[in-house]
Image: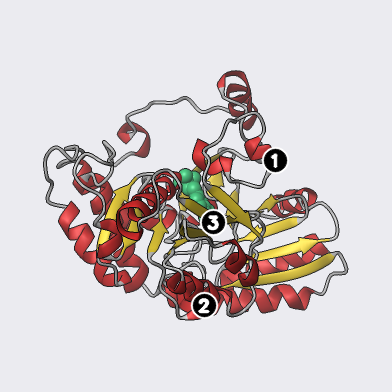
């Protein structure tokens, strides 16, 4: 089929500058994207409107773990989109139950709450944890406390930015939801000291992505698990970025052999096709939610479920998780071998890596862009590197040549 006649929106071609102008003229100014306008993607590659090709080393913050426009996810989405997209939860659909069954089997979960964005999954888990605290743990009314970690990133809604420690995320958005307490990340003793009889949950990331790929000390997640169990506190792991293969395991918690009580997934749950998130829980905790107490018009819709089912299937059937471990190790070793004096630290687990510089990272990201690699700095000095999990050894080596040139 002719690409142009098949496109429902008959846009005339415009230049990069035109698109930048439109965004500046009409858009909210809440992002500062790199000035590259992408129009097409396939696997690890994306193309801009001038036809230049780039290796995507960000993967939409790990939402496109399966690679851009994965053909099997695309086919599942198109097929479902032509059949049934939305029923609301007033009625049932024939994809939701199958999605439940498959994600539960894959993650050894017993109950699932489907939502849309990552932030919504976080909010939902906080609501569930509070309700559990009152109804099961017996915390006095409105006294529930939830512990979170410094430098956390859990999304952008009001409750969530209220317990962020990033001043830019919080400034002028108050007043905030009470009931949250911040402890330093990676410090089990601080967590222990913060727990009170009213503590209902500890919410944390297994690796802090937005903070700059901060990997906690060995044994930290096991210590959190032990404290949570000892004090009857729900361990909520936000695996929205670390989950679904990114770190070389299905879930990052597996690196320490622990199981959270509530696990949050999103981003790659759709392979980048559609906003889908979920709260995965053991039955006892999710059991506190009764009809009418929580919901979402689009949560659990058949299009989302069909896309998520295929996104999970390709992740496992096509060996992407194992590949993340293999190529992540190759990339980490290759980055370390560059040996640039401009580099302060290189760290990573699976294909979630970071190069921390002694200097600002934005100019290096700009140099990488010119050589065909798209990266985005996080904080001032850190380059986050997280290509799709379908990257090959050859593509890793191709990227490494460019990293070496940009860091020399
Ligand atoms: C991206 C992200 C979120 C928020 O997800 P949205 O879909 O942007 O709301 C929450 N937690 C973590 C760890 C994330 O990386």
The residue at the point 76 percent across, 48 percent down is 362
Q: Is residue 182 above or below residue 39?
A: below
Circle 2 or circle 3, nearest the eye: 3
Q: Name the residue under label 1.
A: 167
Residue at the right extreme, as displayed:
341
- On the question of residue 341 being in view, the answer is yes
Cα distance, mark 1 to mark 2? 30 Å
Residue at point 41%, 57% (across, down):
264
Sequence-wise first label, 1 or 2: 1
CA separation in Å, label 2 and label 3: 17 Å
Q: Which of marks 3 and 1 is in front?
A: 3
Residue name at image x 54 percent, y 48 percent:
180
Circle 2 — which element? helix
- Name the quadrant containing residue 105: bottom left
Residue at the disc numbered 2: 222
Q: Do the residues labelled 3 and 1 touch (CB within 8 Å)?
A: no
Residue marked by disc 3: 147
- 97 or 191, which is in the foreground? 191
Quarter of the image where one finds residue 236: bottom left
Does the beta carbon at disc 2 come under 8 Å from ligand 1? no
The residue lying furthest to the top in this view is: 25
Image quadrant in which you'd find residue 346? bottom right
Q: Which of 227 and 218 is in front in this view?
A: 227
Looking at the figure, which quarter contains the C terminus?
Answer: bottom right
Classify 333 as above or below 315. below
Q: Distance between the residues labelled 3 and 1?
A: 19 Å
Expressed as whole percent of the image width and height from the top left, the position of residue 253 reads 47, 72
**Which sits earlier in the primary sequence, circle 2 or circle 3?**
3
Q: Is residue 354 left or right of residue 317?
A: right
> Does the Cβ of the disc 1 residue fall within 8 Å of ligand 1?
no
* x then y, percent, for residue 376: 66, 50
Q: What element carries label 1?
A: helix
């Amino acid at each position: 089929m002719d690409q142009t006649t098949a496109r429902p929106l008959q846009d005339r071609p415009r230049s990069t500058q035109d698109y930048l102008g439109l965004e500046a003229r009409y858009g909210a100014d809440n992002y500062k994207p790199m000035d590259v306008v992408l129009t097409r993607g396939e696997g690890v590659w994306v193309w801009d409107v001038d036809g230049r090709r780039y290796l995507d080393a960000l993967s939409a913050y790990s939402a496109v773990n399966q690679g851009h426009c994965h053909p099997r996810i695309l086919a599942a989405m198109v097929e479902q989109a032509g059949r049934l997209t939305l029923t609301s939860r007033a009625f049932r659909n024939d994809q939701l139950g199958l999605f439940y069954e498959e994600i539960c089997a894959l993650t050894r979960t017993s109950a699932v709450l489907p939502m849309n964005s990552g932030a919504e999954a976080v909010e939902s888990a906080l609501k569930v944890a509070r309700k559990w605290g009152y109804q099961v743990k017996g915390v006095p009314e409105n006294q529930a406390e939830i512990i979170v970690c410094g430098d956390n990133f859990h999304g952008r809604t009001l409750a969530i930015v209220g317990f962020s420690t990033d001043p830019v995320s919080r400034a002028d958005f108050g007043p905030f939801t009470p009931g949250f307490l911040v402890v330093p990340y990676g410090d089990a003793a601080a967590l222990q000291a913060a727990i009170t009889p009213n503590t209902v949950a500890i919410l944390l990331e297994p690796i802090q992505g937005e903070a700059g790929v901060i990997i906690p000390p060995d044994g930290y997640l096991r210590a959190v698990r032990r404290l949570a169990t000892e004090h009857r506190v729900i361990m909520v792991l936000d695996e929205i970025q670390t989950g679904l293969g990114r770190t070389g395991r299905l879930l990052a918690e597996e690196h320490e052999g622990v199981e959270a009580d509530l696990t949050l997934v999103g981003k790659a749950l759709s392979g980048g096709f559609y906003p889908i998130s979920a709260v995965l829980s053991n039955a006892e905790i999710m059991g506190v939610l009764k009809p009418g107490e929580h919901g979402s018009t689009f949560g659990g819709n058949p299009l989302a479920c069909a896309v998520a089912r295929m996104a999970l299937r390709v992740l496992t059937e096509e060996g992407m998780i194992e590949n993340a471990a293999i190529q992540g190790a190759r990339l980490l070793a290759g980055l370390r071998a560059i040996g640039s004096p401009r580099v302060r630290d290189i760290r990573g687990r699976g294909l979630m890596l970071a190069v921390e510089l002694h200097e600002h990272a934005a100019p290096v990201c700009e140099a990488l862009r010119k050589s065909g690699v798209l990266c985005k700095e996080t904080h001032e000095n850190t380059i986050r590197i997280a290509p799709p999990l379908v990257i090959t050894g050859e593509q890793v080596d191709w990227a490494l040549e460019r990293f070496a040139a940009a860091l020399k």
